[in-house]
Image: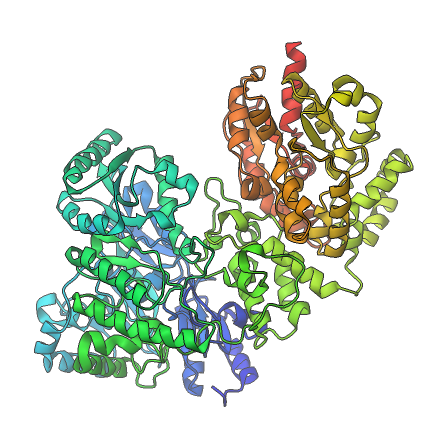
Amino acid sequence: MDTVNGSELAAALRGAVRGEVAFDAASRALTTMDASNYRRVPIGVVAPRDADDVAAALAVCAERGVPVVARGGGTSIAGQATGTGVVFDFTRHMSGILALDPDAGTATVQPGVVCDALREAAAPHGLTFGPDPSTHSRCTVGGMIGNNSCGSHSVAWGTTADNVHALDVLTYRGERVLLGRGAGGFTGPERLGAGADELVGSHLAALRTGFPELPRRISGYALDELLPEKGRGWARAFTGSEGTLGLLTEATVRLVRAPAARALAVLGYPDESAAAEAAAGLLPLGPLTVEGMAADLVGEAALAALPRGRAWLFVETGGAHTAEAEANAAALCRAAAGGGTTAHLVVADPLDQRALWRVREDASGTATRLPDGGEAWPGWEDCAVPPARLGAYLREFRGLLRDHGLRGMPYGHFGDGCIHIRVDFDLLSPQGVARFREFSGELADLVVAHGGSLSGEHGDGLARSELLPRMYGDQLVGLFGHFKELWDPDGGLNPGVLVRPAPLDAQLRFAGLPERPGPVAFAYADDGGDFSAAVRRCVGVAKCRETSAGPGQVMCPSYRATGEEKHSTRGRARLLHEMLTGEVITGGWRAPEVHEALDLCLSCKGCRGDCPVHVDMATYKSEVLYQAYRGRPRPAAHYSMGWLPRWLALTAALRLASPANAAARVGPLAALAKRVGGIAPERPIPPLARRSFARWWRAEGARRFGRGDAGADVVLFPDTFTNHLAPEAGSAAVEVLAAAGLRAEVPGRAVCCGLTYVSTGQLDQARSVLRRTLDRVPGGDAPVTVLEPPCAAALRTDLPELLPGDPRAARLAARVRTFAETLEQCAPGWAPPPINRTVAGQTHCHQSAVLGTAADRRLRGRAGLTGELTAGCCGLAGNFGFERGHFDISVACAEDQLLPAVRGAAPDAVLLADGYSCRTQLEQLGGHRARHLAEVLADAVRGGR
């Protein structure tokens, strides 16, 4: 690779293919890693449009001896989706479903199609694609074929290899190969077909005896599938080859009949070993899943939803209708009772099942953070043993961890004997890496001693290829080498994987990161004050790449709008990682590649709540902006909207709201103001309140609703948006609190949460503002009610992170309550007047991610407000949607969930949006007038009087 001329190679590829060719630093940085411990820097990325593009790009690379690697969703755990040559990204264009035959039960797809997209297309016909890894919402079928992926339903529907009919493949030299099964199952070069026949025919004994019999044997090449008695399954033999034999351009896969209804039996056990030993005994009952996990992976909220125990099996059953599925689950629970269960639960409601499955699926990310905050990593993510040996294997595995002073939290496919685990390897120091290597060798021997496979789902990749001789012996591994030579004599396909492997402790992703934490503005309390450790939170499971938001999900709105990796949370984290490493991204805090990606981050904080490891890209963006612009001129929007509290306070003090509103209605003046302020020309300037909330309070609110010297029940925080832009929400809240028997106190001098300064990275000013706020907010234990959700979130999270040394910061953060939380905690007996109408609108993204929505849902229910608000982000997101260049993305985000939901609402629905940005977005884009929940309740209170 050192002799390759990157510019010449890029030019040749651009001349040969119709798809995108990207050799820029950002594109390379985005593909240096997958979800493994490994990092390999590619020379460039190609996004082919079709098979002809793949062939043309291969010809260019082969002519120059440049290696290639296929990449789907980039969620591989073992490092095989990384490479040093040219990465082929199949997700951009080759992601279609070419045909679906319900009668035959097959589908023909391109390699970049997402697993869930195929399942959704099959669902109307009562069919599904059986394999479903926990990343099914973003992993691709091509990647699943490359790894022979499995998922939770493999006890019923098998591995990907069990569901492959035919494959269309190109070798490194551009030869087309059609793979199927049986005598006519191979069409391709004579040297390859005849060579494989000779290889198999001359080693029948080794192939018949050298492969362990177990449901999750994924390691190595499946050469035994070419045996005559197995029907010469060429497609099955290719599946699991990890892009080392050829590049897949088209696949025909089997679809299975999905049960019309499902139920979930959750069985509790005293510990994980008991659950593991019981799993194999449930298989004769015909379950669809037998998944296991222990209490150390379950948060407090989820723990309350599970039956009594310290470990659980998630066992799914099917039926022709809900009652049958539920009855089957109940029968399974009765049968399992003799196997040591502590309790059980049967869940039939699909939404409740989905919530429980999310606990299991998020474990691939959750497991990277131990209960004490320690980091844990893959590497031994998915080895498998015969299911009947699982309990014994787990006990010895735990013992091996103790011997090496390591910790981990096993979970996974107990019914298949396949265990996932993240281990707290120290991969930052030479001593830790040496322990990683030693442990890997000993664990490989333990797996083999139990008759297992080094990989049970995610392939060998860079993590386990070196250890294959321990599992298969030198003879079979030598046959793997011969098979690879037949397919790829030039060695151009994913070198270092499976054959002639790279050392398992080389090319680790942490090499090159700063050894010591640098000076930063935020405390990063959960990451030891280390920005690098905060960035390392992203392990690449890519939940942020889901193309449609699920129930209650916020992240990642800009990715759903653009579909580009750099606009996902993972993509931005990768760029930050490379910025810290300094090899590909060389500009440090001011690197243009980083700023371009962060520019479309809405700072919605959705990742903080939705990401399994709570990556907080909004905070990282603020840090980058702070570091990049310290002592330098800033973008105009940072002064116009970042200083918004200052401008609004000045306007109110000078009584200039009415003149300002009048000027904003004069086209040329408004256009000039927007141009100077870096504001999107498409945006109307919102009107200012003629009388601020603080002035209303001083003039009449305190007299009507205050408590004078007797002391207040709550402190109502007059945030900037409520105070100057939506005072009606503040006065309504005061009125409702009074109706509930609560008297409010409003600080006599201006206070601010610092949100606009934080979002624009002006963190020195934010600290000054927050110190002043701490001086002015009344002390004591009274809850501090904040009506504007992002302001409440800023006080809860940003305040203690920016002022960690001030004990008042933590105390105030602990006192912050939303409007609904205040009523629930301080006036639990108050019954709001019945409104009895449906609702539509949006829960603010910061509330979903940081504050929680349970109290709001309960309050709406008590008021007879039925229905659900949408999740996601409105797209305005404070200053984001007002900044020049963001309007189109802002609209796209609003069209993701919010605007369609409001358009489809009942004519008499109450439109709710507690966030000022959400209300403004609805007004400006659709002419919809939404209100804060306090305003709606205040109307009802007045009506009641």
Q: How many circles with numbers are drawn on the protein? A: 0
- Nearer to the camera, 83 or 183: 83
Instruction: Determine which quarter of the picture holds residue 863.
Output: top right
| 68 over 158 or under it: above or below | below
Does residue 21 appear left or right of residue 623 in this picture? left
In the visual, does 12 lie left or right of 79?
A: right
User: Picture coordinates of residue 703 (x, y %)?
Assistant: 80, 19
- Residue 556 at what x, y percent from top left? 54, 51
Q: Residue at x 60, y 28 (%)?
A: 822
Q: Is residue 595 visible?
A: yes
Picture layout, residue 533 above or below residue 208: above
Q: Is residue 462 visible?
A: no
Q: Name the residue rendered at 38%, 52% in the picture.
A: 363
Above or below, comparing residue 732 to residue 682 in the picture: above
Q: Is residue 10 left or right of residue 134?
A: right
Quadrant in the picture for residue 790: top right
Residue at the extreme bottom: 3
Expressed as whole percent of the image width and height from the top left, the position of residue 894 reads: 60, 42
Looking at the rendered image, the quarter that the C terminus falls into is top right
Between 357 and 802, the one nearer to me in the picture: 802
Residue situated furthest top in the rendering: 945
Residue visible at 54% across and 72% down in the picture: 513
For the rendered model, the colour scheme is rainbow
Q: Is residue 739 above or below residue 662?
A: above
Q: Position of residue 901 (x, y in %)?
A: 54, 34
